[in-house]
């Protein structure tokens, strides 16, 4: 518990992210990784390998942009630092340990930014219709940087809607169906944002998610692949055991992860 408090207090973030609980979520992910290190290792390795392979296809190697960098568990930092002149890691939370990690790479920097550009709108005081305001947003940060030769969204797209959806649902202002539609819109907007970069693009994403009960039966199956509006089919796929046996009383949780590059 003391370790988690220390991480939470030492985190850098944007105001809306702390208010929405995203610092707590970032600390919890690190905590779960420590408990589930062996179960997560194949997924993290496959993600790092795919990013390296995708980046190797770049003709020009000025700036690499990594969206959803988190604690860099799934980012091949050393390889990217060698390959590119500049590596920009982007997330809404920077934990103390990650800050120390990137100091070893002089050409790596971390930028605190909400890639959906909507979190502050969820928290906007006195907003009469935040859902409508959010849907008017078109993310644009980094698109004007002509040096970006490689951009990767890393295990991020399915996470983008979670906190905004939870906050808006708690407000009681909208029906669940409208909030679910917003979640789909946020994910599709993220893919469209990637597509506007004149660079080599990679997307690692949750295509399906499910739980298995004690009888080995699949429950709570969620399919996201068809909602994302992907411009190309996946090049690779693998399973990620997010919650191995004993981690969650509801049963094991598995994601089918897919990776695309174009």
Image (cartoon, rainbow, N blue to C red):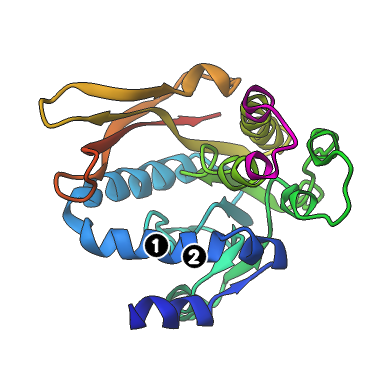
User: Residue at position x 13%, y 25% from top?
Assistant: 216
Residue marked by disc 2: 24
| Secondary structure type for disc 1 | helix
Percent x, y of residue 85: 59, 64
Residue toward you, 29 or 110: 29
User: Residue at position x 57%, y 72% from top?
Assistant: 107
Instruction: Give neighbour class at mark 1: few <14, some 14-19, many 20+ (Cα, 10 Å).
Output: some
User: Residue at position x 57%, y 24% from top?
Assistant: 228
Percent x, y of residue 41: 23, 52
Which of the 4 quarters of the picture holds residue 259? top left
User: Residue at position x 18%, y 30% from top?
Assistant: 213
Query: Is 244 displayed left or right of 166 in the figure?
Result: left
Q: Is residue 87 visible?
A: no
Residue 28: image tag:
1
Q: Is residue 125 visible?
A: yes
Query: Is 118 displayed left or right of 179 in the figure?
Result: right
Which of the 4 quarters of the picture holds residue 253? top left
**Residue range corresponding to the magenta coloring:** 168-179
Instruction: State which quarter of the image contains the C terminus.
Output: top right
CB within 8 Å, label 1 to label 2: yes
Residue toward you, 27 or 56: 27
Residue toward you, 149 or 188: 188
Instruction: Give neighbour class at mark 2: few <14, some 14-19, many 20+ (Cα, 10 Å).
Output: some
| Secondary structure, magenta segment, majority class | helix
């Amino acid at each position: 518990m003391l370790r988690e408090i220390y991480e939470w207090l030492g985190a850098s973030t944007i105001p809306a992210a702390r208010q929405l609980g995203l610092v707590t979520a970032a600390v919890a992910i690190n905590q779960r990784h420590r408990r589930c290190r062996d179960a997560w290792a194949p997924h993290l390795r496959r993600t790092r390998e795919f990013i390296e392979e995708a980046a190797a296809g770049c003709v020009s190697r000025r700036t690499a942009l990594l969206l959803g960098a988190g604690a860099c568990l799934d980012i091949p930092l050393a390889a990217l630092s060698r390959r590119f002149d500049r590596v920009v890691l982007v997330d809404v939370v920077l934990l103390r340990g990650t800050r120390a990690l990137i100091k070893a790479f002089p050409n790596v920097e971390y930028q605190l930014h909400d890639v959906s550009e909507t979190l502050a709108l969820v928290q906007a005081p006195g907003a009469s219709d935040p859902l409508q305001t959010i849907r008017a947003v078109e993310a644009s940060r980094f698109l004007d940087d002509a040096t970006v030769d490689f951009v990767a969204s890393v295990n991020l797209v399915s996470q983008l809607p979670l906190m905004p959806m939870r906050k808006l649902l708690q407000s009681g202002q909208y029906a669940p169906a409208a909030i679910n539609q917003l979640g789909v819109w946020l994910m599709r907007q993220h893919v469209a944002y990637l597509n506007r970069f004149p660079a080599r693009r990679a997307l690692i994403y949750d295509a399906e998610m499910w739980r298995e009960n004690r009888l080995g039966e699949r429950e709570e199956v969620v399919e996201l692949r068809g909602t994302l509006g992907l411009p190309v089919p996946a090049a690779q796929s693998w399973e990620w055991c997010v919650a191995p046996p004993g981690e969650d009383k509801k049963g094991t949780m598995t994601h089918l992860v897919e990776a695309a590059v174009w």
